[in-house]
Amino acid sequence: LHVAAAAAVVPACARADDLATAYFSAGDPRFLQKAFDEIKYGGIVSCEVGSLGAVPSIRVTYKANKLSYKKVLGIFWRACDPTSNDQFGSAGPTIVWTGDEVEKGFAEESRRRLQFATQYTSNTFGPMYKGRPILTEIRPLAAADEWPCSSPRWSAACSRITRVARLVKSV
């Protein structure tokens, strides 16, 4: 009974082989990579640049038994400006892509808390966001969303990432 209850609160994508994936968009996704790469030893397995539909995105694969989805969300929030539609020199919204209702709930709750934090000056969120609305969208992943590198714009970057990933796996 306790095992079934615990499984109900774990995102569906986190159950297979203890690996989970999270998808985010914020301008040029290559700039998000650094924030996730810095957590490699904390449970991040890989970060891949690509696109979901026509939206440039990053796919983060992580070990769900070492790193929670909430913490992955926290890395994203700290890596971008959720109060701006201009990220890393590219116009476009910041987006948290969710794979199921559990992820959607976590994303909505974290966005709500960030919005509440903009009402005050805090050490964790900073005074630069005071009074500004959180513009980050939360969108469901659709079966039609293609991954990886469905856009020619990202194909060169993805090719380099794939080659590096193969080299790392072979070592």
Image (cartoon, helix red, strand yellow):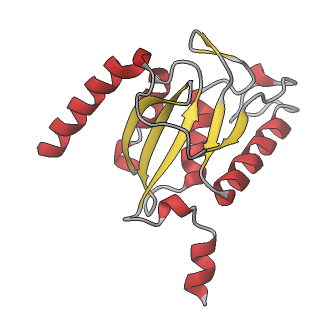
Give x and y (percent) for residue 75.
55, 39
Identify the residue shown where x is 44% and y is 64%: 65
Give x and y (percent) for residue 44.
40, 46
Relative to 131, say whether 45 is above or below. Answer: below
For residue 55, side relative to residue 109 (left or right): left
Relative to 90, say whether 155 is above or below. Answer: below
Name the quarter where the C terminus is drawn.
top left
Identify the residue shown where x is 75% and y is 41%: 111
Identify the residue shown where x is 42% and y is 50%: 62
Which residue occupies the foreground of this view, 50 or 143? 143
Which residue occupies the foreground of this view, 88 or 119? 88
For residue 45, side relative to residue 51 (left or right): left
Identify the residue shown where x is 75% and y is 47%: 108
Give x and y (percent) for residue 71.
56, 49
Which residue occupies the foreground of this view, 102 or 145? 145
Name the quarter where the N terminus is drawn.
bottom right
Give x and y (percent) for residue 72.
54, 46
- The image quadrant that residue 76 belongs to is top right
